[in-house]
Image (cartoon, rainbow, N blue to C red):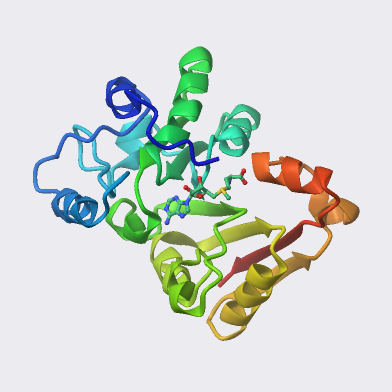
Amino acid sequence: MRLRNIPGSREEIAANPYAIKEEPAEGVEVCIRLHKMGDKKSDEGGRLVLGDWKVKGHWDEVFGNSNPIRIEIGMGKGAFIMEQARRNPDMNFVGIEKYSSVLLRALQKQDEEQLPNIRFIRMDAEYINDVFAEGEVDRIYLNFSDPWPKAKTAKRRLTSHQYLDRYDKILKVDGIVEFKTDNVDLFDFSLEEIEASKWNLIAVTRDLHADAAMNEGNIMTEYETKFSALGQKICKLIINR
Ligand code: SAM
């Protein structure tokens, strides 16, 4: 999945109208910090974001309407979030992905389709609170997030309490987080983090495709297609607070 170092991928992203461009916007300190993070990493960096506008708190202007905003963090090549956008023209979607070489695949597809209700950001989700204002997001999708199996890297898991706190700030009062994975250890960890937090578990299954109610309207992600073809069960949980 991580097709790093595709020559020209950054340039192509910079030129794409559906990617939030990397031009620093006036007064946007996040840009500086993300550039610093990029300095620490040798490959894809963490540079990102921002357009000709300061996006945080201004997504209505980005989309030209005030429809609910749903985001996927770690979208990979973007099949899931693009299908969401196709099925739900009255909602807005933002796909977030750390690696430009993967994100590029979504942008190429978007070039063909030109869906009006989707944008993409290349960024590390650690900085999500610099991109969305309090209550600006309606729903967060986490699909087959990286497991970070070593205990010392647990805070990087997208369902760690550190990330749950970040989501708490940007989600609407009645907003929800949906998480799917084939990784049982990551799923168990996520349930423990939720149990110890202010979040409520509103639905859970350890075999999504056999659970008619939870599977209704399910959009398969690229990893979901791959793992379920190998006979692996898909776990899913939904939380609110
Ligand atoms: N969601 C897709 C799917 O289900 O097919 C891709 C799953 S892939 C295992 C995880 C993706 O999340 C990778 O593309 C990775 O680069 C991205 N990712 C991991 N950590 C991230 C982070 N902190 N911020 C943004 N993207 C991240």
In the image, is residue 142 above or below residue 78?
below
* 228 is higher (above) or lower (below) than 126: above
Number of labelled discs?
0
Please, which residue is most extreme toward the left here? 26
Where residue 198 appears, as percent x and y from the top left, is 53, 81
Horizontal arrangement in the rendering, residue 114 relative to residue 128 (left or right): right
Q: Tell me, yes or no, if residue 115 can be seen here.
A: no
Q: Is residue 158 left or right of residue 130?
A: right
Rendered location of residue 206, percent (x, y): 80, 65
Q: Quadrant of the N terminus?
A: top right
Q: In the drawing, does residue 23 fall left or right of residue 106? A: left
Residue 89 in which image quadrant: top right
In the image, 152 versus 79, the foreground residue is 152
Q: Residue at x 62, y 67 (%)?
A: 239
Q: Residue furthest bottom?
A: 196
Residue 25 visible in the shown view: yes
Quadrant position of the C terminus in the picture: bottom right
Q: Position of residue 69 (x, y in %)?
A: 47, 44
Q: Quadrant of residue 130?
A: bottom left
Q: Is 159 in front, or is 44?
A: 44
Q: Residue furthest top?
A: 112
Q: Is residue 207 above or below residue 12?
A: below
Residue at x 29%, y 49% (from the top left corner): 46
**x and y, in percent, of residue 189 in the image:** 62, 76
- Asked if residue 115 is positioned above or below residue 188 in the image, the reply reads above
Q: Residue at x 34, y 25 (%)?
A: 7
Left or right relative to 180: residue 170: left
Quadrant of the image occupied by residue 61: top left
